[in-house]
């Protein structure tokens, strides 16, 4: 004779087998499809260099402001380049293209500050002749293939986010 409790436990076990919990997985990785590298990774920041993690946004080109928001949504910030070594490592990981980073002079003209730290970005490797502030309209900084360029903030490019802790 099977007791009511045993019967209930049996049906509960059947329920778990029949209805695996997918909800938590879906909530944990809502923007996984935007990750361009290493599709096996489930992190928003799949690239690790030293103690930092990176997200390369290449699926939709956006203006600098939207790029900053996108990085925050992922749990990080726009790339703050800290050294020549870091810049070389980043360049070795990305297709040659145009990418927004954290440096900008929106608050004070020609005073390039990182939106990520509120401090001057520690390392700049400008293209020859840059920053040239063409038509006095270039307030945001991009990696333009191999080096940095000041550019009009509303232009739409890829972007690079960083995080010190992997999300
Ligand atoms: Ca420029």
Image (tube, rainbow, N blue to C red):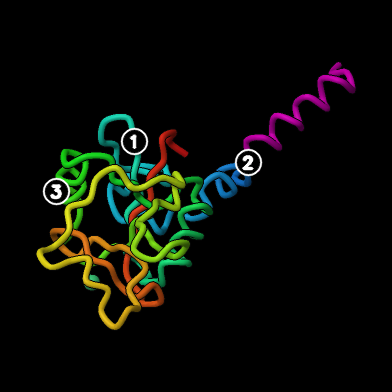
* Distance from Cα at disc 3 to Cα at disc 1: 15 Å
Q: Position of residue 167 (x, y in %)?
A: 47, 39
Kindly indicate the quadrant of the structure image that contains residue 51.
Answer: top left
Residue picked out by circle 2: 21
Q: Position of residue 113 (x, y in %)?
A: 39, 53
From the viewer's perspective, is the residue at label 2 or at label 3 nearer? 3
Residue at figure coordinates x 76%, y 32% from the top left: 11
Q: Name the element at disc 2.
A: loop
Q: Name the element at disc 3.
A: helix
**Label drawn at residue 52:** 1
Q: Residues within 10 Å of mark 3 (few under 14, many from 20)?
A: few
> Is 18 within the magenta?
yes
Image quadrant holding the N terminus, namely top right
* Pointers 1 and 2 in contact (C-beta within 8 Å): no
Residue picked out by circle 3: 92
Reading the chain from its start, which is encountered first: label 3 or label 1? Answer: 1
Give the extent of the magenta segment.
1-20
Q: Residues within 10 Å of mark 2 (few under 14, many from 20)?
A: few
């Amino acid at each position: 004779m099977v007791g009511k409790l045993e019967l209930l436990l049996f049906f509960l076990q059947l329920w778990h087998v029949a209805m695996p919990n997918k909800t938590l997985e879906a909530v944990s990785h809502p923007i996984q499809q935007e990750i361009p590298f290493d599709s096996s990774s489930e992190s928003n920041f799949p690239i690790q260099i030293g103690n930092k993690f990176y997200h390369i946004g290449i699926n939709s080109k956006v203006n600098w402001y939207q790029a900053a928001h996108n990085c925050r949504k992922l749990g990080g910030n726009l790339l703050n380049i800290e050294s020549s070594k870091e810049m070389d490592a980043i360049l070795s990981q990305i297709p040659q293209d145009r990418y927004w980073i954290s440096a900008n002079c929106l608050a004070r003209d020609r005073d390039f500050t990182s939106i990520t730290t509120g401090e001057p970005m520690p390392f700049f490797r400008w293209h020859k002749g840059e920053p040239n502030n063409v038509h006095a309209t270039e307030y945001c900084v991009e990696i333009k293939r191999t080096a940095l360029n000041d550019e009009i903030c509303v232009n739409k490019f890829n972007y690079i986010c960083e995080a010190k802790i992997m999300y």
